[in-house]
Amino acid sequence: MTKEYDVIVIGSGPAGYVAAIRAAQLGLTTACVEKWVDDENNTVLGGTCLNVGCIPSKALLDSSQKYIDAKKEFHTHGIKTSKVSIDIPSMMERKAKVVTQLTQGIKGLFAANKVDSLHGVGTISDNNEVFVLDAKGNSDKYLAKNIIIATGSVPINIPPAPVDNEVIVDSTGALEFDAVPERLGIIGAGVIGLELGSVWGRLGAKVTVLEALDEFLPSVDTQIAREAKKILGKQGLDIKLGSKVTGHKISKGKKKEVTVTFETKGASEEITFDKLIVAVGRRPVTDSLLANDVSIDLCDRGFIKVNEQCQTNVPNIYAVGDVVRGPMLAHKGSEEGVMVAERLADKKTQVNYDLVPSVIYTHPEVAWVGKNEEELKAEGVDYNVGTFPFAASGRALAANDSDGLVKILADSKTDRILGCHIIGASAADLLQQVVIAMEFSSSAEDLGLTMFSHPALSEAVHEAALAANGHAIHIGNRKKR
């Protein structure tokens, strides 16, 4: 007998597993299909983020930051260390333990919320029908009143430097190096490239980042991007803008290396690396997802077309996360998953796409939400700018972590906060205070009148808000545009 569910979710990443759990909490019979397995053929939940993305990369970022602190920074606190070294296998083992703990946690949450976990590749064969093909070739059919697609994304491969998983790797391979490469090349100066470059640069690699665009971090406020490039350059990342990779050649012999050819201002150049990471973006996964009879609309880039409620052109089929429009961010996908689950339970939840926070987990972190100055100028909006440097923060100075600044943009007429941009220690956590304020349509004055703990890094947010109206106490800078 074919089993029927109220909801079948395809994909168990942050968008999928959250959607499945929330749907089950709301009383809907729910199953989640996942194709990933471990070496023993057990289903592995969590998708890219938990297994080969957000979580393992942050584990390596934290480990490598502690290493560089011990090697170069502890002495400023009067802490003397003998020769500091890095044990790569131990670092990787710790990363794996963190991943396992979290993926097993999802398994426990599924059990607690009565979500059925179905192993295999899910294919929508009809508007209410999903086939699941497991690794042994067995296929089962399930019926669903509603289907949520959460199949995520995979790294983009490029012809001039195809991934061989040996010398040329994608972001997944870059999380599995068994030794620190002496010379590391990275194609792409985006979030993934900068984070991975930071990890291996801290551990001793000479890192060169090749970026085809002439502008650094074009989606980031220009002032913040300029500061980020300066700081990362001091840390040893050689970021070459306007450098389009045109080809490569892998040497023969016992020790392989790759020579990359790229064009800069019309001139051809070459650099040789021990390892090359391709980090030029990601594409949505829709392979094997749809049978020929299922007519779900896709855009020309392969994303599934959806409305603001993540509903496809087939009314009972929804899509969330990396497989649809918008930034490829785990938290965005999770909130979409919650929204769809609640709407299937007749609730009227909606995601506020104007307030999706973004973070680059380098050190210092870069975080932003809302509009940047360039966008406001293009829209003809009159605005005030309040900035405050961490160099004037007592807490940042006490921690010897005073690079960067907080920048708040507010409407010059209404004082409503339009955007916040931070580069500095704990920028991701500091930004969230402003995201909450903006969700409630707060003004810069509202933040300025709020009492902040002293001494705390968050005081920089307070001072930037005060500075937007010319009221900063400790150095803050105000501009009116």
Image (spheres, grey):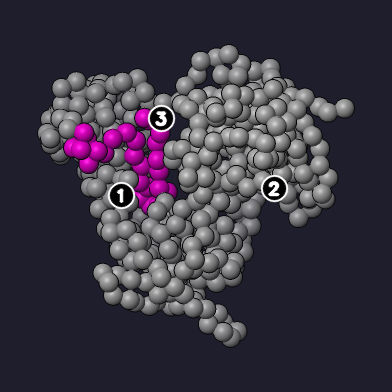
Residue 351 is situated, as x and y percent measured from the top left of the image, at 45, 25
- The stretch in magenta equals 353-379
20 or 202, nearer to the observer: 20
**Does residue 285 appear to the left or right of 228 in the view shown?**
right
The residue positioned 30% from the left and 63% from the top of the image is 242
Residue behind mark 1: 218
Q: Are marks 2 and 3 in contact (CB under 8 Å)?
A: no
Q: Quadrant of residue 246?
A: bottom left
Q: Is residue 21 above or below residue 298?
A: above
Q: Say what secondary structure mark 1 lies in.
A: loop
Residue 450 quadrant: top left
Q: Are marks 1 and 3 in contact (CB under 8 Å)?
A: no
Residue 332, compared with residue 235, is above or below; it is: above
Which mark, by number, is residue 293?
A: none
Question: Up-down: is 58 above or below 178?
Answer: above
Q: Quadrant of the C terminus?
A: top left
Q: CA distance from mark 1 to mark 3?
A: 19 Å
Q: Between disc 2 and disc 3, whose residue precedes?
A: 2
Q: Which mark is residue 353?
A: 3
